[in-house]
């Protein structure tokens, strides 16, 4: 066993599989949070096929995070779960599943998958959470769908009927996306395809603290961008936002949801406006319910989507009605550095980790 790249702060083992049984050739990387290094976990066995389930060999994993728990105002952000791979085995008792060994699949996350660990083989207890993708579907794109892509799709599908209703009574609808990271870029792509289309009456504007991310958002086709510089006075940022979004903001999709950004969105939100909240911030925010009621404004909570929505998203990409946002792939050996850069907002677009070769 050889440890590679230890000087970069991550560890992964290289096995001589010719001298080992297949059950001993599995690896795993584990981290307590995205601020900690990934460590190699020895003696990890390929799991047995669960009753009524399957085992999947992971080929690609989206580099994202989820909130494990909160202590006071401190978030413990841990590696999230976005994977695509190849079916390694299926329980023979599964009826009419239309699943075969070697099929390429996306795994809709199950609760036991959130373990802060990257394996190259995982169990899936319910085969209904496996979505087969065609051979021509890029596996690295598939790995971006179960979390980021799905969350953005859910946000857009919630926004779609609201925008369509607003268009009946307004000449123009202004949509503000707060956050130009992976979620924001997915939302631009999906909103342009599913909401605005060829309609020039829907303007999609993106706000972020990073100029580089805003430039990338422009490349993805948004109508305009706003630099929310943390060093600027709050009133200036509000006036700047209203200047860009002429007539005010009708619908906000907020992937940050910090006290400051949320308060700002309410300041620029029009009467009967809607805020869709999908941010990771867990700080408490004070809202004047009387003002909310008088302005007939609404706040909608957002989490990830359903397995059926994930199937719909796959169909959209397969039909090329939607294209993925900018992404880059990295070997799994660079997991620690990738998550460090992700935590420090140094990665533009999405990052995808290659866990193993696509060919089995």
Image (cartoon, grey):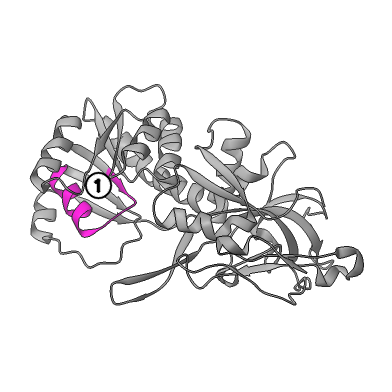
Q: For mark 1, does the 10 Å Cα neighbourhood hold few (<14), some (14 to 19), or many (20 or more) residues?
A: many
315 vs 278: above or below:
above
Q: Please check the rendered image and state whether residue 266 is part of the magenta-colored stretch, yes or no.
A: yes
Is residue 40 covered in magenta?
Answer: no
SS class, disc 1: strand
Span highlighted in magenta in the image: 252-270
Which residue does the numbered mark 1 point to in the structure image?
274
Q: Is residue 64 visible?
A: no
Quarter the N terminus occupies: bottom right
Residue in view at x 38 percent, y 34 percent: 217
Please determine whether, in this image, residue 134 is positioned above or below residue 18: above
Q: Relative to 197, is 233 on the left or the right?
A: left
Name the spot of residue 107 as percent of width and height, x first.
64, 57
* Identity of the residue drawn at 53% across and 68% down: 37
Residue in front for this viewpoint, 105 or 178:
178
Instruction: Give percent across and percent down for residue 286.
Output: 15, 64
Asked which quadrant contains residue 317, the reply is top right
Residue 47 % position (x, y): 76, 72
Residue 138 % position (x, y): 66, 40
In the picture provided, is 61 more to the left or to the right than 241?
right
Residue 333 quadrant = bottom right
Q: Quadrant of residue 2?
A: bottom right
């Amino acid at each position: 066993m050889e440890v590679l790249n230890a000087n970069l702060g991550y560890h992964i083992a290289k096995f001589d599989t010719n001298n080992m049984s297949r059950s001993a050739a599995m690896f795993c990387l584990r981290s307590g949070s995205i601020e900690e290094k990934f460590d190699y976990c020895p003696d990890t066995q390929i799991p047995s096929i669960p009753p009524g389930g399957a085992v999947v060999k992971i080929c690609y994993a989206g580099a994202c995070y989820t909130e494990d728990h909160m202590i006071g105002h401190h978030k413990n952000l841990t590696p999230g779960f976005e994977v695509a791979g190849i079916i390694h085995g299926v329980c023979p008792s599964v009826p009419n599943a239309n699943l075969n060994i070697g099929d390429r699949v996306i795994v809709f996350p199950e609760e036991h998958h959130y373990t802060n660990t990257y394996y190259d083989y995982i169990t899936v207890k319910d085969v209904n959470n496996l979505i087969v993708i065609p051979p021509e579907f890029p596996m690295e794109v598939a790995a971006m769908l179960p979390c980021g892509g799905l969350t953005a799709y859910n946000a857009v599908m919630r926004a779609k009927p609201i925008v369509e209703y607003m268009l009946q009574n307004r000449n123009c609808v202004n949509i503000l996306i707060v956050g130009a990271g992976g979620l924001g870029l997915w939302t631009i792509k999906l909103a342009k395809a599913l909401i605005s289309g060829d309609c020039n009456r829907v303007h999609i504007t993106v706000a972020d603290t990073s100029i580089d991310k805003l430039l990338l958002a422009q490349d993805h086709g948004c109508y305009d961008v706003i630099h929310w510089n943390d060093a600027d006075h709050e009133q200036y940022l509000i006036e700047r936002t209203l200047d860009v979004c002429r007539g005010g903001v009708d619908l906000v999709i907020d992937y940050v949801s910090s006290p400051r950004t949320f308060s700002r969105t309410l300041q620029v939100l029009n009467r009967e406006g809607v805020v869709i909240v999908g941010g990771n911030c867990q700080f408490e925010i004070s809202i004047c319910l009387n003002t909310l009621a008088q302005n007939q404004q609404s706040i909608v909570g957002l989490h990830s989507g359903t397995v059926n929505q994930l199937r719909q998203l796959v169909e959209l990409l397969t039909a090329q009605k939607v294209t993925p946002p900018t992404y880059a792939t990295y070997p799994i050996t660079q997991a620690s550095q990738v998550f460090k850069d992700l935590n420090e907002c140094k990665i533009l677009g999405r990052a995808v980790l290659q866990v193993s070769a696509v060919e089995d």
